[in-house]
Structure formats: C-alpha cells, structure tokens
Image (cartoon, rainbow, N blue to C red):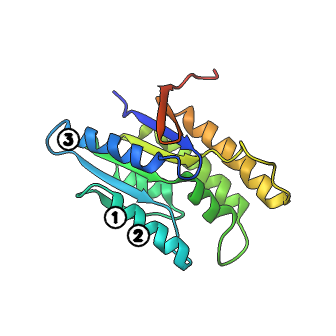
Amino acid sequence: MAAQHQLVVGGQRSGKSGWAERQALAWQQAAAGRRVSVVATALAADDEMRARIAHHRAQRPTGFATLESPLALTTTLAQAAAPDHLLVVDCLTLWLTNWLMPLDGRPDPVAWAAEREALLATLPTLASPVIFISNEVGWGVSPLGREVREFVDELGRLNQAVALRCQHLTLMVAGQAWTRPVESNA
C-alpha cells in the first residue's frame, strides 16, 4: 500500500503547523519505532523570520527531527523516506518563495519548473507519509504588483497539484480543521 499524504492549507496563523504536528505526534505514538521529521523550508534572513523559526521550533513536540530544505525539497523527501518516518513539510509557501523570490538574486523559472515537476512525480513513490503545509493566499484582495500576482497564482497551482497527489485535504480556519478525502479531477 502506498504511503498516505495530506495537504493542510489555511491563512497565516490559522493553526496549520500546530494541527499538523498533533497529527504527526498521534501517528508516531500509534506504533513503536515510528519517527517524525519536520522538513523546514524557511530561510532565516532577518530578525523577524529568525523569531518565527524559533517560535515554531519551541512549539514542536519533543523528539521531532528537523531537516532544513529551502530549495531541494524533492531530494530531501526522497532521501528521508521510509515507511516508519513521517515527514511534515513546513511549508510549501516558503519553498515557493525561495524559488520565485530568492534573497540573493533573480529567480530561475526553468529550475523551478523542473523542481516542481520532480516533486509531483516523486510524491506517489515515497515510502513515507507526508503532511504538507501551505498557505491559502488567494482569498484576499488582489495584489497590485505583477510579481506578487504571479506568486499567488503559482502557489494556487502548486497547492492544487500537490492536493491531487494527497489522500486528504485539511482546511484550517481560526484554529479549526476541516478535513476531507481528496477528489480526483480525472
């Protein structure tokens, strides 16, 4: 049987990470020998982001490992995958930001497209269950800048593509989870 994946989406501070971590802890405690790793995609580029990262680390259950993967998410998932190892990807939004809005230069759309396709192709083959966390940013006011509109569009496309490779989708609203099976568009 293939590993079960899920996507957790919601707005900023909607409770996505905490909910995903509680699900991961319950999975870990359900059988001996299970491990959980958080695959962190954030880059600590300024004091505010360093504080956010520190807050997330402090809130995580004891014993969860951390794998830093700001760009090479597919490789990290493939290397860490094992049936007894749940991976929590926190988060797709920052991973996409690192690709489309890099701090040290111009984006590489060709490399991004290759990495995105590699992730989508790898997901069905992973031995690990994966919980992906992502923001739902397209519910607000339409951004004024072209680059930001393109980012919002690309995140929406990424979330849809990942959801189709997951078995469950959870929408977080005000700390409350709404979970349902994913329906295929096929």
Q: Is residue 131 left or right of residue 84?
A: right
Instruction: Relative to 156, say whether 115 is above or below.
Output: below
User: Spatial distance from mark 1 to mark 2, Cα to Cα?
Assistant: 6 Å
1 and 2 marks in contact (CB < 8 Å): yes
Q: Position of residue 46 (x, y in %)?
A: 56, 78
Quarter of the image with the C terminus in it: top right
Q: Amino acid at mark 1?
A: Ala
Residue that mark 3 sits on: 29
User: Spatial distance from mark 3 to mark 1, Cα to Cα?
Assistant: 20 Å
Quarter of the image with the N terminus in it: top left
Residue at 49% across / 57% down in the picture? 73
Q: Amino acid at mark 2?
A: Ala
Q: Nearer the viewer, mark 3 or mark 2?
A: 2
Residue at 71% across / 59% down in the picture? 110
Say few, some or many: other residues with alpha carbon within 10 Å of mark 2 (under 14 / 14 to 19 / 20 or more). few
Residue that mark 2 sits on: 54
Camera-side residue: 10 or 106?
Answer: 10
Element at label 2: helix
Instruction: Relative to 185, say whether 52 is above or below.
Output: below
Q: Mark on residue 58?
A: 1
